Image (cartoon, helix red, strand yellow):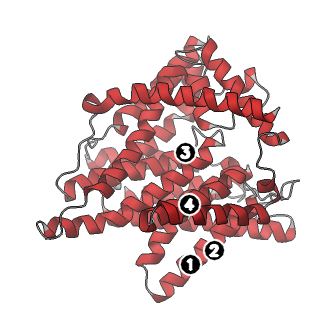
Amino acid sequence: MFPLIIVYVVLVIVRPQEYFPALMGVPVLPISLALSFAAWLASGARVPSAPQFLLLPAFFVVMMISEVANGWFGGIKDQLGKFGPIVLAFFIIASACTTQRRIRILMGVMVVCATILALHGVGQARTGIGWSGIPIGEDGRIQYVGIFNDPNDLGMLFVSVFPMAGLLCHRARALGKLFWLGCIGLLLYGVYLTNSRGAMLGVLVVIGAYIWYRRGMVVAGILGLLGLTVMKMLSSRMQELDAGEESANGRVDAWYEGLHMFTSHPLLGVGPGNFTDYNPLTAHNSFVLVLAETGFIGYLVWLALIGYSFWMVAAVLRLKPDAVADPERFELWQEERPLALTLLLSLCGMFVCAFFLSRSYMIVLYFVLAIVTGFYVGARQRIDGLPSLAVSESGGRWIPAAIGSIAGLFVLVTILLRTSG
């Protein structure tokens, strides 16, 4: 089963089926996912206990109900084809990747795949066209095929795997360190070539969060300001990071329209994929997009899905058994901590990008959430004292969290609209 998962992840990210003539037209993605699912069922593996295994299907159901509520019964079939594979992939990865070894292997595969895309971008920037046949964007920003044909999507991918490359580099020896350092360099250069402001901020947050964890808030704040200054010097688009700038102003207007869609369709939203039917520009904010398209119900479930993922890695980091009183448990925790910190950094970087991009339903996001879920399931088996985080016990806390975050979005948009004028 696990090798089939690796094949599926490679096909999703590298996507050779979209430019190799021998593979074009062959449904390799559905076939590899179907084989992975069949192997999972044949293995007799039970679905582990974690809130995400309940919340993701619930969100999927809300998406389909939202389509019907907005008058499109065919939306059920549409969502089965679009989001159904994401749910299946999540279940398979989260169920199979519960050991440290498998998680590190999957991380390595994702880093190598992302590095291949960065190399494609380097060639694209030098010659004007990549080996996939995709030319560089008219604005000079690199792009790839399929789900990565937007430079911002590429940037989000690079940011998501950047901490993973750091962990693998730290654990490697000699030549291995050189290899992973090369990957890190290419990923960061790839972020630069995408010229994505969200991705650059994501890199800054990842590095800042790591420094905060290791050296404290003051040092992280000072270095963060220096990093932001350097990024503004390197990127012309970062120099335009202002609410009144044309691109940023368009995003704020889209956020405003998204909130208006929510107030007019508060429970189930306007339906997944229907945002651009009401506004010519997409939301450019994954939180606003979910709120507008699936309403409060969908947003509540989606926010809980994300919130539990952050809670899981934070719970492992906070556990810290007493080294003197319980040395064996402390030693086990020391082995889990690097993975927990890496996944926390990946989540931070990814959702900083997601705040400026409409990527609520992008499969790579759910790959990372699946790895987090599998990691926590395994960590609870290896270390005593980690909470179960059952929805029945802690699910109620996400209602005020959802209400508060929605209120925060309204306040933020109001402030930005006033300052942009």
Mark 2 Cα within 10 Å, few/some/many (few <14, many 20+)? some
Residue at which label 3 appears: 363
**In the image, 337: left or right of 181?**
left
Residue at which label 2 appears: 185
Indicate the quadrant where residue 2 lies.
bottom left
Q: Do the residues labelled 2 and 1 touch (CB within 8 Å)?
A: yes
| Three-letter code for the amino acid on which mark 1 is drawn | Leu
Q: Are marks 1 and 4 in contact (CB under 8 Å)?
A: no
Picture residue at 39% right of the left edge, 51% below the top:
372
Which is nearer the N-term, disc 2 or disc 3?
2
Farthest residue, direction left:
325
Residue at which label 4 appears: 221
In what element is the residue under mark 2?
helix
Q: Mark 4 or mark 3, which is nearer to you?
A: 4
Indicate the quadrant where residue 290 lies.
top right
- What's the CA distance linking mark 2 and mark 4? 24 Å
Residue at which label 1 appears: 181
Which is nearer the N-term, disc 1 or disc 4?
1
- What's the CA distance linking mark 2 and mark 1? 6 Å
The number of callouts visible is 4
Mark 1 Cα within 10 Å, few/some/many (few <14, many 20+)? some
Q: Give how far across and how far down residue 145 sits, in percent.
A: 72, 53
